[in-house]
Image (spheres, coloured by chain):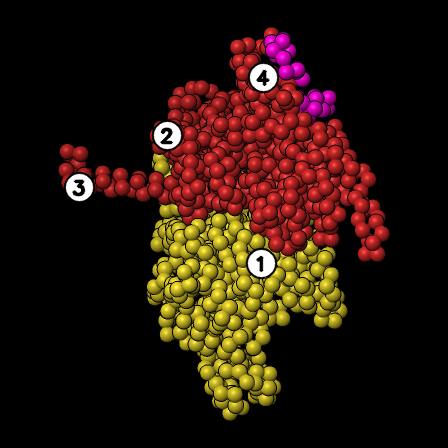
Chain colours: A red, B yellow
Amino acid sequence: MERTIGLLGGGQLGQMLCEAANPLGIKVVILDAEKSPAKQVNAKNDHIDGSFVDAEKIRELARQVDILTVEIEHVDTVVLEEIAEYGVEVARPDGKKVVKRVEVQPSWKTIRTIQDKFLQKDHLTKNGVQTAVSKAVQSTAEDLQAFGKEMGYPFMLKARKDAYDGRGNYPVKSASDIPGALKALKDRGLYAEKWANFKMELAVMVVKTEDSTSTDGSATVAYPAVETIHEDSICKLVYAPARGVSTKVQREAQELARKAVGSLWGKGVFGVELFLMPDGELMLNEIAPRPHNSGHYTIEACPTFSQYKSQLLSILGLMPSFPDSRIPSMFPATIMLNILGGASKSAHNEIMKHAIAMPRAALHMYGKESKPARKIGHITVVADSMYSGEALMQPLISMTDAMRAERKGLSKPSPVSQPSSPAGRPLVAVTMGSDSDLNVLKPGLALLETLKIPYKVTITSAHRTPMRMHEFATNAVSEGFKVIIAAAGGAAHLPGMIASATPLPVIGVPVKGSTLDGMDSLLSIVQMPRGVPVATVAINNSINAALLAARILGTSDPIIQAQLVKYAKDMEVEVVGKAERLEEVGFKEY
Amino acid sequence: MERTIGLLGGGQLGQMLCEAANPLGIKVVILDAEKSPAKQVNAKNDHIDGSFVDAEKIRELARQVDILTVEIEHVDTVVLEEIAEYGVEVARPDGKKVVKRVEVQPSWKTIRTIQDKFLQKDHLTKNGVQTAVSKAVQSTAEDLQAFGKEMGYPFMLKARKDAYDGRGNYPVKSASDIPGALKALKDRGLYAEKWANFKMELAVMVVKTEDSTSTDGSATVAYPAVETIHEDSICKLVYAPARGVSTKVQREAQELARKAVGSLWGKGVFGVELFLMPDGELMLNEIAPRPHNSGHYTIEACPTFSQYKSQLLSILGLMPSFPDSRIPSMFPATIMLNILGGASKSAHNEIMKHAIAMPRAALHMYGKESKPARKIGHITVVADSMYSGEALMQPLISMTDAMRAERKGLSKPSPVSQPSSPAGRPLVAVTMGSDSDLNVLKPGLALLETLKIPYKVTITSAHRTPMRMHEFATNAVSEGFKVIIAAAGGAAHLPGMIASATPLPVIGVPVKGSTLDGMDSLLSIVQMPRGVPVATVAINNSINAALLAARILGTSDPIIQAQLVKYAKDMEVEVVGKAERLEEVGFKEY
């Protein structure tokens, strides 16, 4: 590629950006301290040693490149504005000085707006993006008391600038916390924010592909909405996709994040943090104008289009379009765990050794000196289901928990047992025409639990709730279901009607009624017209419906398929055992 | 990781090795020319500038590291033997010289054996690995004529050493070619090889995890068998997995490759090239004791365990075990295309621009100066099926074909049209109790073709060929089938019996016989006991069986699911059209 990128900051984000840029033939020149992580993986160019907040060094970088970008938002936007608006002076070979044009991406306006978190919130609110209610406040007890009175306690007192990983935030639980809060955040511009009692923290990486702003998120593309878990105010885990979140909320989160990013200036990748509230509403928390910790998982989950590649291509103006403006993950489940420095410099050796030898894990060490609680690496696990991903990740989480306990002088955490109930989004929807069918379904539901297959059970009557049934069937794919089990009796129309409104495989369980021995149900379910199949099992045999659902899921999930092989083996052992006993004791005693 | 690796050679293989080593915290020190590709992505260490065939430079490298390895087999094995057996002299801080032990992986014995292709073949033959018949020959017309007389024409005359990418090979089509062959390969040790009229070239990456040798491939792990396409004697394309190759041959190729690598000394990753002969037999062609072009695809296809990671972990003794000694690809289909330098230095710009913006493609440029036909990069495409992968790759192949034509001064190749029929392995097995059931199945088979779902059709009678049926069912998973459709009539035991011997979903089609209107078949199929489900469809309704199979495949293949949505839509349009006509012309005219 012809154009060279200048990068302010050479930490791990810059490092992973260079790891993406190298094979693409994209040149990146870095401004940061000598031997910073990004420079360690990029010996193609002459980098600049110095601080990314030093205006003269930034100008020196600009002279060598065509586009400036950042891996951190705490930079000097005055000099970025100067460079973007007026260019930078360079000496020609003949000694004459000329002005060279250099792009700044994303725009200095975006970086300046985002740097000041209160300005950021104000900008978003004006652009119709819902955020937590906040207000600029003076560093006085009166101002804070007034806020507390109006918005209630607890609330958050936050520094407007230079805040990250929880530094610069102070929770004010009651009026008596105010003096402590003012002391902790003295000499800084402040704002107060109404407490957001969220159910889950989500994050969406968004790529902005055009310089112009929009009010509807056009010219933006979103990665999946992920779930972030924080500990000690630092990101600990990322679950992609967010666990137990409906496809509707998934899409709404992506749309809100795209709308927010669309309102900003310039191109690039943005990390958007959101709160999912208990009522299902979404609220934007904050935006980072750069690759983000919550997007590390894309290196493996989108092996041909990570957040780093998106950053490079968007600022170069080379970003392709994606169907539906979404960059999909290529795996059903991906989990990322941060490695923070432990009590000693070698405290992370054990987790490195464990992770490096896991077939499904990718270890990323940043080449940084280990300091307590410093982000020094991360591990990404890819899996066929969130359930198996969680099982793979659990030992690693336990190791980081032990490192944290040692670091903080806490007693060792007790080893966490494997999750005992299925996590993640339900894969099988089980429905019935009437609650009187539930008894027939119970053995099948119990078997799904034994096989650890997440399911959702409901009632949708073809004749009594036709609209509800139709909605259920048409939304089944987008809800993330893979198979539907439907039980019904008599003129049993439910399985066939559902099959007519979804491309998913539908398994029908004929329920035996008070007359005709279930033959009415069986024939109503099995004798579907050409074009709309129902996979019919024996009358009242919900066990077989559950097993069939497992066999279907097993076609793309080897773990489930292995469980089925084991199930058949166990069944064989049981029958052989009975045969042996019968042969031993004879039929009279048996 | 504590131990440092010294790498002889810093080309693209070394570069990708470093790209894998950096995030794992593994130190690699490189011996090669200044600014070689590997050094461009590794600024963590002080590398050595010089030639990897220079004995003193190799000793200098050995002094700095704990393990020596290679990215190329054309190295000085005498010095490697010396270092491995006697160590290398290093000066202590007090000036005293001591001997330091350094491992060489894989063993110098392996590198020496492989370097000389005739020695390599001889070694493999002695270890029971089938290769093409070959014989060491003198550089005389008499010797070659004798070989031609004995083995027939054409045959291959090959240089024993320093041969790669076709250089050092000369096809001898008849006795009259002999003088030319001797001239082309003068002053080199030679051997002649019987012509292998293979059907397909396969390659398997194998990881050797123990120092000791074996005769059965134990302590080795294999990646999938891939198909390689060569042009001008240089690898052009790699299809993973190999197209249209049965699971049986897949496994045999992996086993043969593992057996061959198991017979060699030391640890590391090996590229094994094989010939698949027209009769289905496999023959080993040659082995490379290092990462290999045919394994580049693993960077994306195994995003947590590429061939480069395997090389690092195996030589460090950290390789984990894998179920069944296989490292699976995480995608149904991956295709790799090499980029060779074109007629001009910028001839590859167009393909780079195209590939960089493809959502499903990963571009790897090596940072090498472009020269005609030099390997300067590659592109990997990942896809949900080989069919869609081929469609994605086709425009890129056309671009490389045009580059080749320009480079060779040929007329531009005509654009190749998209493949029109589904490629790849059958996903649906369709079977029946008797050929009299075929008429009932035909509409379903036709629909599978319309939906472009690859299937295989056969006959397996539960009562007349019970063993054959059982074998079919037990092998179905390993054959790569995802769904089975079984049709039967009367006492229709076939679907249930198959279901009892496989964890795959089995769809039963009751065939209507001459009595009882098919009710006998229906009840025999649907009323399975608990534990063994059969997805039963309506009597004689193979259309619904095919659609159900498609719905099942659609749970993990979004392309198939989208086709089903379209199918339902078309069906609706058809019925609505009929309704309109009925309303228009009235029931009497209709």
Q: Residue at x 74, y 40 (%)?
A: A104
Depth-wise, is mark 4 or mark 3 nearer the camera? 4
Q: Residue at x 49, y 22 (%)?
A: A459
For the residue marked with disc 2, what is the amino acid? Pro
Task: Please state the chain letter of the residue tagged with numbered disc 3 in the rendered image.
Answer: A
Depth-wise, is mark 1 or mark 2 nearer the camera? 1
Task: Please name the residue that numbered disc 2 is placed on.
Answer: A413
Depth-wise, is mark 3 or mark 1 nearer the camera? 1
User: Magenta residues?
Assistant: A117-146
The quadrant in which residue A317 appears is: top right
Q: Residues within 10 Å of mark 3 (few under 14, many from 20)?
A: few
Q: CA distance from mark 3 to mark 2?
A: 53 Å
Which percent across, then down, holds residue B193?
A: 49, 79
Residue farthest to the front?
B94
For the residues tagged 3 and 1, is the chain the same? Answer: no
Pointer 4 or 3: first along the chain:
4
Residue A341 vs B484, above or below: the answer is: above
Q: CA distance from mark 4 to mark 1?
A: 52 Å
For the residues tagged 1 and 2, is the chain the same? Answer: no
Q: Secondary structure at mark 2?
A: loop
Task: Please name the residue that numbered disc 3 is placed on.
Answer: A583
Pointer 3 or 2: first along the chain:
2
Q: Report the disc number at residue A182.
A: 4
Quadrant (top left, top right, bottom left, bottom right) of the C terminus of chain A: top left
For the residues tagged 4 and 1, is the chain the same? Answer: no
Q: Is residue B58 visible?
A: yes
Q: Residues within 10 Å of mark 1 (few under 14, many from 20)?
A: many
Q: Residues within 10 Å of mark 2 (few under 14, many from 20)?
A: some
